[in-house]
Image (tube, helix red, strand yellow):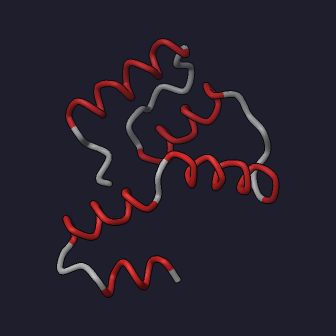
Amino acid sequence: KKMAEIRKHTAGPDAFRKRFFRWFDAFRAMKYVHHARDGYHPNVSVETAAAWLLAVREKSAERNNTARDLLCIFRKSDRTQTWGI
């Protein structure tokens, strides 16, 4: 419902993104994470989740990254804005 409302009241992708993330704040993100964990996905370590995300995004062919390696990859992605969000 909220997505339809946001789409209706925005003119383009930039305005949509801004309005969406104003609504989908840290509190809503945490609620979503807990809902997804409780109903759909197992509870896993941060390292496991980060490695999975990178594999899905095809950012890393390396399967044995350390937690530090994963953090560096994510930081570089944030700096270069390569997530496509």
Give how far across and how far down residue 9 sits, in percent: 28, 83
Count of numbered marks: 0
Left or right of 20 on screen, residue 66: right
**Place of residue 83 in the rendered image (x, y in percent of width and height, measured from the top left):** 32, 46
Residue 18: quarter of image = bottom left
Q: In which quadrant of the rendered view does residue 49 lie? A: top right
| Residue at figure coordinates x 29%, y 33% from the top left | 78
Estimate the x, y position of residue 27 in percent, counting from the top left.
Answer: 57, 48
For the C terminus, the quadrant is bottom left
- Of residues 69 and 23, the one nearer the viewer is 23
Q: Left of 33 or right of it: where is 56?
A: left
**In this view of the protein, which residue sits in the foreground, 14 or 9?**
9
- In the figure, is residue 8 to the left or right of 33? left
For image coordinates 44% across by 32% down, the residue present is: 61
Residue visible at 48% across and 78% down in the picture? 2
Image position of 63 with respect to 32: above or below: above
Relative to residue 54, is residue 9 drawn left or right?
left
Residue pictured at 64% horizontal, 55% vertical? 32
- Nearer to us in this view, 27 or 44: 27
